[in-house]
Image (spheres, rainbow, N blue to C red):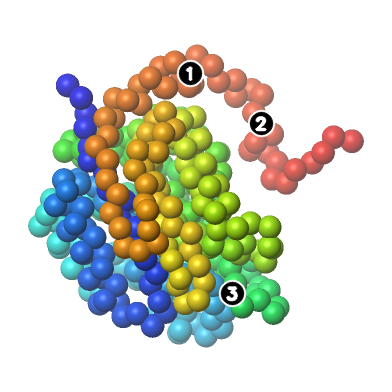
Amino acid sequence: MPRLITLAGAQTGPIQRADSRARTLERLIALLESAARQGAQLVVFPELALTTFFPRWFIPEAAELDAWFEREMPNPGCQRLFDRARELGVGFYLGYAELTPEGRRFNSAITVGPDGRILAKYRKVHLPGSVEPRPGSRFQQLEKRYFEYGDLGFPAFRGPAEWGGPVMGMLICNDRRWPEAWRCYGLQGVELMVMGYNSAAYDPNGGETESADLRRFHSTLAVQANAYMNATWAVSVAKAGNEDGSGLIGGSVIVSPDGLVVAEARTLEDEVILAECDLDACRQGKEKMFNFAAHRRPEHYRRIVEQVGAVPPG
């Protein structure tokens, strides 16, 4: 009997700096309800889904910075999303800025089951950008300033029986570009990867060589290639459009274990994409081309974990 799950990507249009939390939550709930009406069992929201992408701003005051962070999850500011999802019997992935009781800050995501229980938490490992602002730049990329590197690693987890019991993994934004992260999940038998992102439509490091179209192509390419090489379904969901004068690429996709795009966002606005996915379709890749037990040779891979920067031969 096939193990089927109906997956939804809940892309959001821009969330402006001045938008209220209540208004943003209304939009997320509307997307959740739309997905549920179409039969979705799991809805994937973007990275930092509750706020604008605040790392584009230099925010020197701690009190102002703390206002963008969640001290617990759920909390009164987003409880209605959890309540509505539980009423509908729908799970979700949600990206947010996390402030721990010890004062540590992370770019985090959770996956919540259809009963409203948090199944797993992930903290972003591959932080882009810089600690110090770039002089003269209108927009910054200050994730390294506002967040610590994730400290939870890449632990896979089991989704509930209602979803077919998939082996699941989570990533956030820039993580999707790093095959090491995917392979850590692949070695745990991952069948469903979920991730959100807020990728700029310009080069956030100050360059001028990448257009929005090229950045969107790279975003999709990374998900297709890594889904194929780890024989897993993948849902990659954007915040999109003109946010506070800064463009975001959009391009949300659902990708099969063969690397095929089976659903794709067509707008830069709030939009639901949907696909019914057979988890057993992962078996083809896992048992043949990417049968790790038969074909991997880790004795030759030490450089991957022992070296950070590229070192050309002498």
Taking 239 as reference, is 162 left or right?
Answer: left
The quarter holding residue 110 reads bottom left
**Of circles 3 and 2, which is in front?**
3
SS for callout 1: loop
The residue nearer to you, when weighing 201 against 18, is: 201
The answer to whether 200 is drawn above or below residue 260 in the figure is: below
> Is tag 3's residue or tag 2's residue first in the polypeptide sequence?
3
Which is closer to the viewer, label 1 or label 2? 1
> Disc 1 and disc 2: Cα gap in Å?
22 Å
**Residue beneath disc 2:** 302
Q: Amino acid at mark 2?
A: Arg
Relative side of 312 to 206, left or right? right
The quadrant in which the N terminus is found is top left
For marks 3 and 1, give the CA distance. 43 Å
Please tell me which residue lies in front, 217 or 193: 217
Residue 222 position (above or below residue 189): below
First in sequence: mark 3 vs mark 1: 3
Q: Earlier in the sequence, mark 1 or mark 2?
A: 1
Identify the residue position indicated by label 3 in the image.
139
Quadrant in which residue 21 is drawn = bottom left
Viewer-nearest residue: 30 or 168: 30
Q: Which mark is residue 204?
A: none
Residue beneath label 1, please? 289
What residue is rendered at 69% in x and 34% in y?
Answer: 303
Q: Position of residue 11 (x, y in %)?
A: 34, 58
Three-letter code, disc 3: Phe
